[in-house]
Image (cartoon, helix red, strand yellow):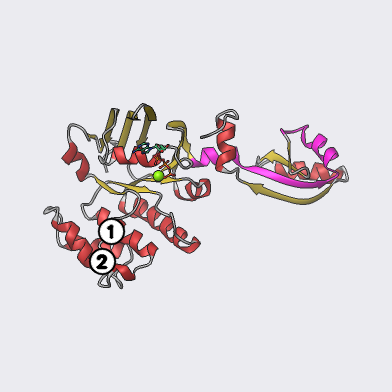
């Protein structure tokens, strides 16, 4: 696989009316990685994705897919792209197979054998000849992905692919997306408003708030920094004084202490508390919520 980024977004902006909705985004997605686009409702994820896939025109800035500019080399760029924005467009009264045939007909370069290949890939082999209206939401999502993969793209873009799925469906979709990146070498851009989902699914993440990227990093670096330990200890005030010898300590719900999670130190902090006759009733690691993360990164500014 080439080392050109699968996707390059350069200073991308969108103004609608007199409101700037997307304010100069920059990020790259590399071959074979799952890249998360994380932000709360209204942050600008779908608008950005709609510009990347050519559904709406950027006010300014560039989008390159496999090195091809979507403005000047649109057809070349789109050859490398498969996408589902919001919901897959499917015909409920046709079978899954007929839906694939319908979309394959629009692109003569798709070999007939590709239909069976993508069907097997998304795990719909046994149900592909049933009507789509009999499919579960998860199966529809998979058929949508099969359709997006018909043209053998290098980049797959999925806007909130687990929306509406139950926990088992979410897990299945996550494993499937990781499988596509690993086994098919696909680059995947996936948007989500759930921090936990991004943590489990992605290699890297861009965090978007209010039309701006406030941070781009590897998921491991982001979470290594953000993981915390909640201590339920008695007496709390004494425990706080002891832990403060080593680290920063916050109080939560008037009855728990929160420290950063530092893997190498937790056991010795705990020992120190026990030696000082503090009862350690509970100790667990937790992730901050997306809201906490934003507050931290934006220095306490409200997100809207
Ligand atoms: N056609 C439009 N006209 C006016 N405003 C728009 C239009 N499309 C989007 N917006 C505004 O742009 C902002 C970003 O919307 P967008 O749908 O991109 O957010 P999102 O991150 O995808 O949110 P969600 O998680 O709810 O899907 C919102 O404030 C929205 O109201
Ligand atoms: Mg959206």
Q: Is residue 140 left or right of residue 112?
A: right
Tell me residue 133's x, y (percent).
Answer: 31, 68
- Furthest-left residue in view? 108
The mark that comes first in sequence, 1 or 2, is: 2
Q: Nearer the viewer, residue 2 or 112?
A: 112
Q: Which residue is mark 2?
A: 96
In three-dimensional space, the C-alpha distance between marks 1 and 2, rounded to whole angstroms, equals 10 Å
The region drawn magenta spans 219-248
- Furthest-front residue in view? 17
Assess whether residue 231 is covered by the magenta stretch: yes
Against 159, is 68 above or below?
above
Q: Is residue 91 left or right of residue 164?
A: left
The verdict on label 2 being within 8 Å of ligand 2 is: no
The verdict on label 1 being within 8 Å of ligand 2 is: no
Q: Is residue 263 left or right of residue 268?
A: left
| Circle on res. 156 | none
Whether residue 30 is visible here, answered yes or no, is no
Whether residue 239 is visible here, answered yes or no, is yes
Element marked by disc 1:
helix
Q: Which residue is mark 1?
A: 146
Q: Residue at x 19, y 57 (%)?
A: 103
Element marked by disc 2:
helix
Against 105, is 29 above or below?
above
């Amino acid at each position: 696989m080439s080392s050109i980024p699968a996707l390059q977004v350069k200073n991308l902006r969108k103004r609608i009316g007199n409101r700037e909705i997307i304010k100069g985004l920059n990020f790259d997605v590399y071959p074979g990685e799952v890249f998360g686009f994380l932000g709360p409702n209204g942050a600008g994820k779908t608008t950005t994705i709609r510009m990347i896939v050519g559904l709406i025109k950027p006010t300014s800035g560039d989008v390159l897919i496999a090195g091809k500019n979507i403005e000047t080399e649109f057809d070349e760029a789109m050859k490398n792209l498969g996408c589902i924005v919001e919901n897959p467009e499917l015909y409920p009264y046709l079978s899954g197979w007929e839906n694939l045939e319908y979309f394959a007909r629009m692109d003569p370069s798709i070999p007939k054998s590709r239909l069976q290949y993508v069907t097997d890939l998304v795990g719909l082999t046994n149900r592909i000849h049933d009507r789509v209206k009999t499919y579960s939401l998860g199966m529809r999502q998979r058929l949508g992905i099969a359709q997006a993969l018909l043209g053998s793209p290098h980049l797959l873009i999925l806007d909130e692919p687990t929306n509406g799925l139950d926990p088992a469906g979410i897990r299945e979709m996550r494993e499937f997306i990781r499988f596509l990146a690993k086994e098919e070498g696909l680059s995947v851009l996936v948007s989500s408003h759930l921090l936990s989902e991004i943590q489990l699914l992605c290699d890297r993440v861009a965090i978007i708030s209010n039309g701006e990227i406030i941070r781009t990093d590897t998921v491991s670096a982001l979470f290594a920094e953000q993981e915390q330990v909640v201590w339920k200890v008695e007496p709390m005030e004494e425990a706080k004084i002891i832990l403060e010898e080593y680290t920063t300590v916050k109080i939560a719900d008037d009855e728990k202490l929160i420290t950063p999670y530092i893997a190498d130190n937790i056991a010795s902090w705990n020992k120190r508390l026990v030696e000082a006759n503090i009862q350690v009733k509970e100790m667990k690691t937790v992730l901050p919520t997306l809201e906490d993360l934003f507050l931290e990164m934006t220095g306490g500014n409200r997100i809207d």
